[in-house]
Amino acid sequence: MHMKEANRESKVEWITWDLGASGSDEGLTTPLPASCSIVVDKGTLDCALVEGKCAALLCAVDKLMPPGGVYAVISFRQAKLLKRIFASPALAWTIETIMDLRDNDVTEALPAVDAMTNVAQCEAYTPSVTSRNDESRHGKFNGSVDNEESTGGSPDSPQCSTICILRKSVAESTHAIAINEETLKAQVDAVLDDWYGEEMPFLTEGREAELRAAWASALSASRAHTVTHTGALSKSNVDGVSVLNVNTDTLPLSNVYQLVFTPDERSEISFEDFEEDFHSFINSSHGRKRMASLRDTATGDSAVGLDCVLAFLQATQ
């Protein structure tokens, strides 16, 4: 709404629409215009990917545009990922330009666009607590991997900015047929599964090695803390060596959260979101196979083993 307050020109018409409202126009406060020649999206697609609303957003944009209409997207996502999403067969769109805004002379490389009318601007909002959830099936944390992509930089950094220019097909056989949202969602899910599972996995070999080392250090610190605060513990003899009878392979889920995510990632991924995704995993058929290393508590701050954590990260990245 700040844009509305800052631009009170009489010739500007403002419409509020929940572009993520799946399958309906219930999010509209006023009727849509007949069409918008160009839809400008700065960050809205990124938010839609976080919230699992990418297909709903793209269907709404398609509804806004007439045949030949232009969708201009500015995103912090890699061009390679966006190209795969926009190439989904369910979209009758042509990719005219996808480029990294860091490139020199980028403005000269952009295609000429005819004079546009009825411009619709998609504006993203920033909630007080955010979590990147690239389609909810992937878990609320995994989108944070974009912070470590080859382009580098945080989501708001100019080091990782992409502009995409797409045009809606003018073919008679396509523009009269609405996009099937379920089909598009399945296609987007498949793209994201491949991207975060193969192209840009959260759990790389290096990150797993770091987690194993951090886990061992945390367990050692936990044992030392237990001895300090509880006094003498019962002992057993293994090969003539006296050892403490303490659980040496599990940590509270709150500690796991601190180990798994960097400070920057924790600023975007709340513990509550991580906890919710983790418990969803362990209650799934695949997760139940690893339940031997998990001990739930009434508080939800579970003691969990490293193997179970690694299985969770591998399954949900």
Image (tube, grey):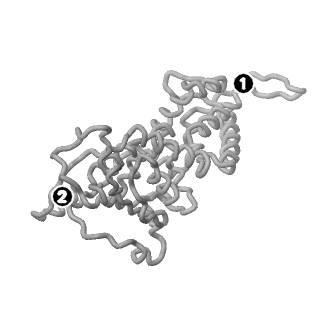
Q: Is residue 95 left or right of residue 208?
A: left
Position in image of residue 271 (x %, y %)? 48, 38
Label 2–label 1 contact, CB within 8 A: no
Foreground residue among 108 and 7: 108
Sequence-earlier tag: 2 or 1: 2
Packing grade of label 1 (10 A; few <14, some 14-19, many >=20) is few
Mark 2–mark 1 distance (CA, rounded to whole Å): 67 Å
77 to 243, vertically: above or below? below
Q: Type of residue at label 1? A: Leu
| Residue 178 circle label | none
Q: Residue furthest front?
A: 173
Q: Is residue 274 left or right of residue 169?
A: right
Determine which residue is flagged by label 2: 4
Position in image of residue 313 (x %, y %)? 59, 39
The quadrant of the picture occupied by the C terminus is top right
20 to 280, vertically: above or below? below
User: Residue 123's quadrant in the figure?
Assistant: bottom left
The quadrant of the picture occupied by the N terminus is bottom left
Foreground residue among 256 and 189: 189
Packing grade of label 2 (10 A; few <14, some 14-19, many >=20) is few
Position in image of residue 229 (x %, y %)? 63, 31
Position in image of residue 148 (x %, y %)? 56, 56
Q: Residue furthest left?
A: 10
Residue occupying image coordinates x 32% and y 52%:
172
Secondary element type, mark 1:
loop
Determine which residue is flagged by label 1: 233
Secondary element type, mark 2:
helix
Residue occupying image coordinates x 56% and y 23%:
296
Residue occupying image coordinates x 21% and y 49%:
16
Residue occupying image coordinates x 50% and y 34%:
277
Q: Type of residue at label 2? A: Lys
293 to 26, vertically: above or below? above
